[in-house]
Image (tube, rainbow, N blue to C red):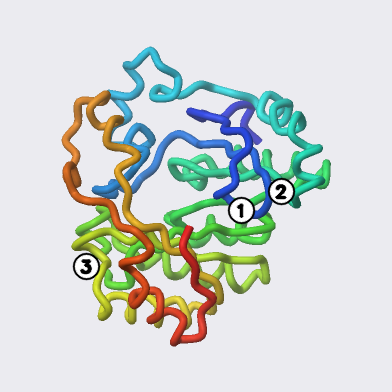
Amino acid sequence: MPATGKIFNIQKFSINDGPGIRTTVFFKGCPLSCRWCSNPESQNRNAAIADAMADETYCGREVTVEEVMAEVRKDMPFYEESGGGMTLSGGEVLQQMDFAIALIEAARAENIHVAVETTGYTPPERFRRFAPLPDLYLFDFKHYDREMHHQGTGVYNDIILENLRAAVATGREVIARIPVIPGFNTGLLRARGMAQALVDAGVRTVHLLPFHQFGEKKYEELGVPYEYKGVKQLHPEVLGRYRQEFVDRGLLCSFK
């Protein structure tokens, strides 16, 4: 297992990254280039710019498993009270899979619940080694259509769909998280396609994440163009019919 991994933040008292109160570890690096990404500093395409910045929340820092676990342990009383734990997020966790595995094993040794937020973008043969380890998957699902997925993220979704099915097959809890992005995956026809793809993959629970502008300032700091600049954020109250498409297909669907 690697001695270190590269992260750009450890966030305390997270309540949106799995059940209970959680400590979220944000991994640096992501092979996708989602045009709306709220963490552009984590994308591989912006790595050279981010690495040149003095701020560790952009350039990241090398940490050991024990350094991460020392921070995680501080919050154990909150986990016990709330049913929380540690969440590995990103960036893309699977880009540093061996470090992620080492962290999961360290947490498991101390009976700490582990959630992993992932795009699922890694070779399936590698993912099969990782798949049984987390307690919970927060599986990012951007689009059911192969070409549209490529247009929005820079990669095709073939291996993502395969790895989603593999995650479900482990029997671990899998929650699909859909960023609802204007002009990309909005509209009832697209909602139906998304819902059906998740049903076909065996997913039962879906969280909808309406588009927001939380990451806009980061693009300015990095000096990279932001294609969604000025686009209005979405609110749950205008997405009720969109959500209903998922409910109509038997999925437990809520906004986050």
Residue occupying the far top of the picture: 54
Specify whether 83 is left or right of 45: right
- Mark earlier in primary sequence (2, 1): 1
- Mark earlier in primary sequence (3, 2): 2
Q: Element under label 1? A: loop
- Mark earlier in primary sequence (1, 3): 1
Q: Nearer the viewer, residue 255 or 191?
A: 255
Three-letter residue code for mark 3: Glu
Q: Position of residue 27 (x, y in %)?
A: 50, 36
* Mark number, residue 18: 1
CB within 8 Å, label 3 to label 2: no
Q: Residue at x 29, y 49 (%)?
A: 34
Q: Nearer the viewer, residue 209 or 170?
A: 209
Mark 3: few/some/many CA within 10 Å (<14, 14-19, 20+): few
* Mark number, residue 84: 2
- Residue 181, quarter of picture: bottom left
Check disc 3 and report the residue beneath it: 147
Q: Position of residue 15 (x, y in %)?
A: 59, 46
Q: Position of residue 216 (x, y in %)?
A: 27, 36
CB within 8 Å, label 2 to label 1: yes
The CA distance from mark 2 to mark 1 is: 7 Å
Q: Residue at x 35, y 32 (%)?
A: 41
Mark 1: few/some/many CA within 10 Å (<14, 14-19, 20+): many
